[in-house]
Amino acid sequence: MTPIGVAVVGAGTLGKRHAENVCRAIPGARLAAVVDRDLDRARQVAAELGVERAAAHFEQIAARDDIQAVVIASPSKFHAEGIQAAARAGKHIFCEKPISLSLEDARAALEAVSGAGVLLQLGFMRRYDPAYSNAKRRIDSGEIGDPIMFKSLGRDRQPPPAVFYQGGVNGTLFSDSAIHDFDLGRWLMNDEIAEVHTFAGLLASPEIAEFGDIDVCLVNLRFRRGGIGNVEAFRKSNYGYDIRTEITGTKGTIQIGYLQQTANLTLTASRVSYDVVDHWLVRFREAYRLELASFVSAIQKGGPALVTGEDGVRALEAALAAERSFHEGRVATVAAPETLPPANDKP
Amino acid sequence: MTPIGVAVVGAGTLGKRHAENVCRAIPGARLAAVVDRDLDRARQVAAELGVERAAAHFEQIAARDDIQAVVIASPSKFHAEGIQAAARAGKHIFCEKPISLSLEDARAALEAVSGAGVLLQLGFMRRYDPAYSNAKRRIDSGEIGDPIMFKSLGRDRQPPPAVFYQGGVNGTLFSDSAIHDFDLGRWLMNDEIAEVHTFAGLLASPEIAEFGDIDVCLVNLRFRRGGIGNVEAFRKSNYGYDIRTEITGTKGTIQIGYLQQTANLTLTASRVSYDVVDHWLVRFREAYRLELASFVSAIQKGGPALVTGEDGVRALEAALAAERSFHEGRVATVAAPETLPPANDKP
Amino acid sequence: MTPIGVAVVGAGTLGKRHAENVCRAIPGARLAAVVDRDLDRARQVAAELGVERAAAHFEQIAARDDIQAVVIASPSKFHAEGIQAAARAGKHIFCEKPISLSLEDARAALEAVSGAGVLLQLGFMRRYDPAYSNAKRRIDSGEIGDPIMFKSLGRDRQPPPAVFYQGGVNGTLFSDSAIHDFDLGRWLMNDEIAEVHTFAGLLASPEIAEFGDIDVCLVNLRFRRGGIGNVEAFRKSNYGYDIRTEITGTKGTIQIGYLQQTANLTLTASRVSYDVVDHWLVRFREAYRLELASFVSAIQKGGPALVTGEDGVRALEAALAAERSFHEGRVATVAAPETLPPANDKP
Amino acid sequence: MTPIGVAVVGAGTLGKRHAENVCRAIPGARLAAVVDRDLDRARQVAAELGVERAAAHFEQIAARDDIQAVVIASPSKFHAEGIQAAARAGKHIFCEKPISLSLEDARAALEAVSGAGVLLQLGFMRRYDPAYSNAKRRIDSGEIGDPIMFKSLGRDRQPPPAVFYQGGVNGTLFSDSAIHDFDLGRWLMNDEIAEVHTFAGLLASPEIAEFGDIDVCLVNLRFRRGGIGNVEAFRKSNYGYDIRTEITGTKGTIQIGYLQQTANLTLTASRVSYDVVDHWLVRFREAYRLELASFVSAIQKGGPALVTGEDGVRALEAALAAERSFHEGRVATVAAPETLPPANDKP
């Protein structure tokens, strides 16, 4: 089978990782081009990976026949227009989360995808993490009864660098970070988020005050079928990258999460200590590989994607509602009932 | 030093434990009488512990000179009147949580205590648990910087039996269970709870529907100095008694909690498993002993109690606000600002 | 029932703990006297516990009718003669491990006990630790199949003080420390130790070289029915008091042991750390209480003791063989076959 | 740089993994041929990986210029002759452990390597596992003081299939399994094993009795500089693949090992359970990749290999001595003093 040619758009930390995975770890795929507004950066990543084609703009390579798919890893603000451009060019699309920073743009992008008949997969990579997918299987098998409570937290060791915040191109704590947990909540609870309430603040990282973002939020959740939950996103744990989720059902509970990077425990007179996972590229190394493999496989089989554009919209709705609740100081409804599809069918 | 004579009022599960501790584990104290509306039960506990005096009503023993202190472990609804009666009789008072089911009664009880000049200690035993008191010391020493986030959960293995719910004498999930966590939040954050928001429901234990209580709640918290947090109370984990708390500061985090009852791990072909703590009497055995020792010591030294009646009122205010938020579907303010004392001084 | 009067002989760290337990934590027992060659120490412990009688020598109180039992916690060298004296006086005997430092003296002591018709219980308290007794039940229930391998280690944080070593009155690393593990091996494997091989040395604590003892040993074990195992004793872990045991069977494995003292985990930028159990009095607090309660209960019921004098002899034989193996540089047989009783026939 | 052409000799489970790694995960290497006495198997692996050349015998491809290196993953009995053949052909050699089943053959193979001037790396992949290499760095940095005790165990979930044992081509429990731990002991202690003592047996897997091997051994170790240790190898844990190592020094201890495969904990009424790593290919996935990357890098840089042929001989000597001790029932010396090089002088 001819390998699928993939262009990676956005050659930052994560774009580069996707490019490496396409190159080395995904049978059936071939890295065809690297695109970045910073052409030097595009060229450097392309060179490191032995790929000839680098470009500053996707349009410069959109017409190429040897490119069947695009991985969009540009700043979040440009995701929706990236989807539109790729759809117009008839390419299958893997897009990093969030699908957009506005619901309008997201809806327009989904229409473009639908019109073009291409495949769109959203980059909620946690669904591919072995611990999370194992938990999903257990929940769906009934091992913990009916899921009734969902708790999830995500903590970075340190806030992203200033460049991340400049121009607001990467959204806020809600749309950039907590959105992962909103997606997990929908997926693991097999339900939709109906209402949210947020307390939040800039409590540990005064250095990001100038960018108008916060560094910690606690979001209370109510699901449509009655389940409840909460989500924490925090930018500055100091101790490590900490991702934990707990789903409680009528018969039991599943916990997901760990802090240890290696299996070492050092015991001395002054302390018992171990190494903590430092970074999301380490914690979710395998998930990033598996989601791309799944994307390529979906293209080969004619779809569908396991994480859809609609999933991207739903999580964004929750994130924006959580942000609204914070600003308004009251409970926020996630989406108008008339636009809601039926709750997820259990697989 | 003559031992302090202690009457235990309420000879249920916890009252009996307090009586045993007074008898056997608290140097300086002597069990002088056991009181229970069910006189047979009072007599049985007294007999088991080798104490002669049992009574159906505190008034029957209130005048005795060999009783200097009372431990109130009756149903919650009768705590405030028990405090009033003991104060009138000039006895020092250890009262189980909650101090009352109504703020009015609680305030009146505190006035009676104040008027009588006796000592009142509230039964928030978690403050005496070695893990919690160790965490408190670490936080106050600055080890995690300024505390900014508080998360706490309490899960029973199974809901209490029907008799617990009858007549509503033991309050609700908020005033009976989550109140422990509200107290921990105030204590560990060195702050007062300002606002709460609750999602809750009866999701796992339909058998208690007839009593009008719920079995799970998630309460979002905002503290006065800006910290945030949340609290979970759940009646039916199925797997064990699970108490966990996490305090996050600007420099680090402290986690408190464990599930293992013994240090055994059994590894077989079908499972890797361990024993889980089953019951609060097991998890907090030492805390129950230490809080009574502290009470007796405070009496001997002329006070003060480490957990005061005011602490009891504050936690009750938070619990009632959390319940109000649940019923009204919106954020609830914890207490009117004019009645608030200055935030806790750090020790 | 009249409480059983107990004299504690030896008022050092452990003797004092036994005295406290008799006083406060063992229903049915009464502390009747404290005996120590250092009469001031005996008097001080007696005074702290509100007991009138203190003596320098057991003989001074041997004739008292209000003493029915003796707890021997003197230095190991004096255990056997203490048993003889107590047996002559017709007292029931709880004796700390080891039963003696010589097999001859141990045998003579057992004969005295047998002749006097009193009860003798050995102080292998680990058998009463909830984790160990739970493991024993699981093994005997067949949960791990037939036990085939036994591994056990015991580590002190720091070597005992110089006074412990002076005069050799407390035996060696083998007879003082590893003897616990030899007893556990016999008990958990339901078998007798047949052969041992030892590598050992003074590797971490040069300060005890003057006393002629070592600070670490690794003893390979072969049991009579074919099982194998090993034991480690180490005097200077630096990080804490560490007791771990693992029994492997044909169907699974049970691990016993933990290092955490409280349920706290502190996570900061420089380390993730937790508290470690520091001392055996902390780790085995409950076991020390339970073994005395069991002793008192056995007296009340007319026996038998759950840990017998024969158990004390068997463990001593293994300890002495391990020491012999170390000195001779070859495998040592534990006991001459002709003197061996049938292997334990416990289930 | 032209990629290094690699032929993989032996296309069983591990050979196939090596071939996959060369193909997909090792920049700078190229899979040039797959060799297996079972030509169909060689062809199948080659086809799966898109390689044209498959052969039944190394000699058939030995002359090819596009092959610069050989990975030997044939049965252990053929390792030494494989090294000889590859050396004769002037290829660099990566050889799975053990280097041979006989010391004579091993020595002859090393001479051939030395004469040919090629690079030889032994497949002790644990040295490349992130947990082990992290521990090595900590030990060498002095974090635990001078290492004085080494304990290591390796347990398979189930014994290998009958085909593994047939003809004795894969050695014994000592030379196939415990040899990993002997290598770890030498490496982590920075010392040589001087003496060993073994208790062992066929205790859990009667089905392998016909092959004359045992399924469990406990080997006591004495190192030349005085350190002591022990090693366990066990074929049938039932619960999972369990690899644990502990190095104790004069100032502290490092533990390496874990049992959990994912970060999931499932808590239900009947059990608290988690997934256990099942297989060595899972536990050491990254180590297998890193050791080949290190091999290719050593070739590119002109050596040296980080795990040498001499390391292979040393570990084999310890394994054979452990086996001898078992058969003779006494302590065995590892190697004649006159042939011993100075102890490792690595930091």
Image (cartoon, coloured by chain):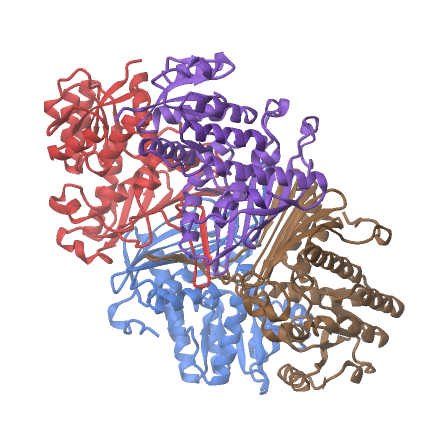
Chain colours: A blue, B red, C purple, D brown
Give the quadrant of residue A140: bottom left
Q: How many marks?
A: 0
Residue C38 is left or right of residue C302, and the answer is right
Can you say whether D256 is above or below B313 in the image? below
Q: Position of residue C240 (x, y in %)?
A: 55, 37
| Lateral position of residue B60 relative to residue C157, left or right | left
> In the depicted view, which residue is nearer to us: D12 or C306?
C306
Position in image of residue C325 (x %, y %): 67, 42
Residue B191 visible in the snapshot? no
Q: Residue at x 15, y 37 (%)?
A: B77
D86 left or right of D275 in image: right
- In this rendering, the answer to whether C52 lies above or below A297 is above
Q: On screen, D291 above or below A307?
A: above
Q: Name above or below for residue A153 compared with residue D27.
A: above
| Image location (x, y in percent) of residue C301 | 31, 34
Q: Nearer the viewer, residue A60 or A157?
A: A157
Does residue D12 appear in this view?
yes
Q: Nearer the viewer, residue A25 or C155?
A: C155
Q: Toward the viewer: A62 or D71?
A: D71
Q: Position of residue B9 (x, y in %)?
A: 18, 30
Quadrant where the N terminus of chain D sits is bottom right
